[in-house]
Amino acid sequence: MHSIGILAHSADGAALCFLEMCRAAERRLGAHEHPEITLSILPMGPVLDAWERMDLATIVAYLGRTADRLAAAGCAFFVCPDNTAHIALEEPGTALPLPGLHIADIVAQRARTDARTRVGLLGTRWTMEGPVYARALSRAGIEMRVPPDAQRARVDAIIFDELCRGIMTTSSRDEYVRIIEGLRDDGCGAVILGCTEIPLLVTPEVSPLPTLDSTRLLAQEAVAVAAGDRPLPHWRGGPDM
């Protein structure tokens, strides 16, 4: 089997992605079986100011250090279980040292397979307002909706103040449910959980809309690639998929 590299940027989402890879592989291969997986993460804190400035060159260089570690470890390809990080990874520049799966393309393809024509998106404010999902969904012929400004601010605050720090509260879950109800009322047929920590808080059982869980979809696709059911990716960063 091909070995998988996890290019992590936020800890909780990366941990969920790793565990889902192991569970997905076990369902496919049998008990206690999974491909070799290497997870590498640098702390997010040193580049949060760069995110505020949208200094994407600094961020992609920082993420590139992790990609170098994964390539040196012998990984055949990488996944980045951080939706926002793809804004930087899509920047033109030097190719990454190993190919990777693109989280937004995987989610968009699942939405198209599910015959969705309009979907809502929750994530960091950079993800909700940025180009990554808008481009991926447009390529798939799907409309995208995001919550209003004040709700986007709350979604973002809960991610950084709570979810990325392992804090889960009923009140925050209830807020997310109300926001998803608004997306449903806006004609969305599903909601993308476009921050890899959100599935820890919002499960399919409580969501008013069917969920497109970016974390688990990425992990499951990675296992399919590692097992040879899908070809190895060719994307090495940059805007070309």
Image (spheres, rainbow, N blue to C red):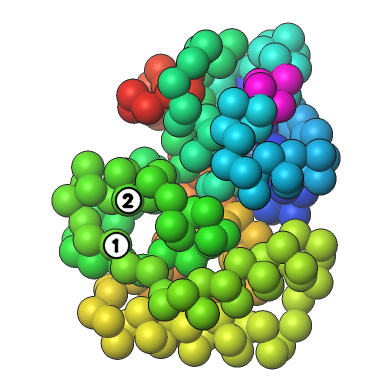
Magenta segment main secondary structure: helix
> In whole angstroms, how far apart are the C-alphas of marks 2 and 1?
7 Å
Circles 2 and 1, Cβ within 8 Å, touching? The answer is yes
Which label sits on residue 144?
Answer: 1
Of label 2 and label 1, which has the lower sequence position? Answer: 2
Q: Position of residue 115 (x, y in %)?
A: 19, 61
Q: Label 2 amino acid? A: Ala
Mark 2 packing: few (<14 Cα in 10 Å), some, or many (20+)? some
Position of residue 110 in the picture relative to residue 139 (left or right): right
Q: Which residue is mark 2?
A: 134
Asked if residue 197 is positioned above or below residue 82 in the image, the reply reads: below
Taking the spot 52% from the left edge, 30% from the top edge, the residue there is: 89
Position of residue 89 in the picture relative to residue 116 (left or right): right
Look at the numbered disc 1 and give the secondary structure of its residue. Answer: strand
Magenta run includes residue 195: no
Look at the image and tell me whether residue 232 can be seen.
no
Asked if residue 138 is positioned above or below residue 175 in the image, the reply reads: above
Q: Position of residue 55 (x, y in %)?
A: 60, 35
- The magenta segment is 60-65
Which label sits on residue 43?
Answer: none
Mark 1 packing: few (<14 Cα in 10 Å), some, or many (20+)? some
Q: Label 1 amino acid? A: Met
Look at the numbered disc 2 and give the secondary structure of its residue. Answer: helix
